[in-house]
Structure formats: C-alpha cells, structure tokens
Image (cartoon, rainbow, N blue to C red):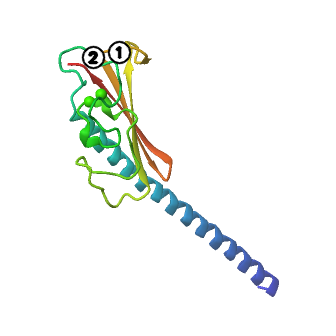
Amino acid sequence: MTLVEVNLSMVIIGMVAVTLASLYTTANRSADKSVNVTRAMYLAMSLMEEIHGRRWDENTNGSISSTLGVDAGENATNKTTFDDVDDFNGYVESSIQYPAGAAMTGYTGFSRDVAVAFLDANNGVSASTTTRKRVTVTVKKSGQTLVTLHDMFSQM
Ligand SMILES: [Ca+2]
Ligand SMILES: [Ca+2]
C-alpha cells in the first residue's frame, strides 16, 4: 500500500466508525422510547383499573346523571373523593399518584389525564345522556403522548 492508500483506508475506517456510533445512539434512543411506552402502558392500565373500581354513575336510582364530572362534595383535583366513573372527566395527574393519593416515585416527567364521554348507538360521542360512557386515559412524558387507552363502561 502506498501512503495515499493507507490514508484513504484510514478515512474509510473512520467513516464506518462514525456510522456505527450513530447507529448505536439511535438504537439506544429507541430502546429508551420503548421502555417509556411500556411504563406508560402500565400507568394507563392501572388508572383504568382504578376507574373500574368506581360505580357507573353518580345516581344509584337508575336515572342517569346528565353531568360528566365531579358532583357535589367532590374535589376535581383529588381522585380519592371520586365515587363514579365520570368524576374522572377532565382529571389531570401531573405527577403520578397511587389510588389512595400518595405520590408514586420513579415516574418523573410522566403525567396522566382522563376524558369521559357518552356514546351513541354507533359508538360516536353523544351530546345527550346514554347508557354507555367511553373513558380515555392518556399518558404523557414531558408533554409528549405515549399511550392513549380507551374503555367502554355500560350501565348494568
Ligand atoms: Ca361522583
Ligand atoms: Ca360524576
């Protein structure tokens, strides 16, 4: 090999090394993202499970409350005061909490929010009261949505 050839092969080796390094960084970044999505899925499912623990409606006499959201005596920022599914409508958990309200550590940057809507017979959002409610839990990290989970709750 001439000196020119040696220099050229060193340049090529250098370029391959740079490419490998950037591939490694990209792979690492997508592994981080996938871990975050898995954790976000856990957070979405656990909040949905909490909501399942509430009764279907504020009213227990069979008539459906037309208001989606908290009712008299309940606090929209304190989920431990919620007793029915739609009390979670508009709920935002900017730092993750256990069902009893204590802070859950290890989830810095994650947040959860909930929306509840009545559904019509075609699964479209209904402006009037129906016997079905759709609950949507969204989990974000640093403001970016990672998981959106829907579930339907029917009046028994
Ligand atoms: Ca309620
Ligand atoms: Ca309610």
If you read the primary sequence from the N terminus, does the residue marked by circle 1 or circle 2 appear first? Answer: 2
Name of the residue lying farthest toward the front: 73
Amino acid marked by disc 1: Thr
Amino acid marked by disc 2: Ile
Residue drawn at x 34%, y 38% is 76
SS of the residue under disc 2: loop
Residue placed most toward the observer, 7 or 17:
17
In the rendering, at what x and y percent does residue 42 appear?
Answer: 32, 48
Quadrant of the snapshot with the N terminus: bottom right
Quadrant of the snapshot with the C terminus: top left
Q: Which mark is residue 64?
A: 2
Residue drawn at x 27%, y 16% is 64
Residue placed most toward the observer, 46 or 114:
114
Indicate the quadrant of ligand 1 in the picture: top left
Residue drawn at x 71%, y 74% is 12
**Residue picked out by circle 1:** 129
Q: What is the total number of numbered labels drawn onto the structure image?
A: 2
Residue placed most toward the observer, 43 or 56:
56
- Which quadrant of the structure image shows residue 3? bottom right
- The alpha-carbon separation of the residues under discs 1 and 2 comes to 7 Å
Q: Is residue 117 above or below residue 148?
A: above
Q: Which mark is residue 99?
A: none
SS of the residue under disc 1: loop
In the rendering, at what x and y percent does residue 39 appear?
Answer: 36, 52
- Which quadrant of the structure image shows residue 56? top left
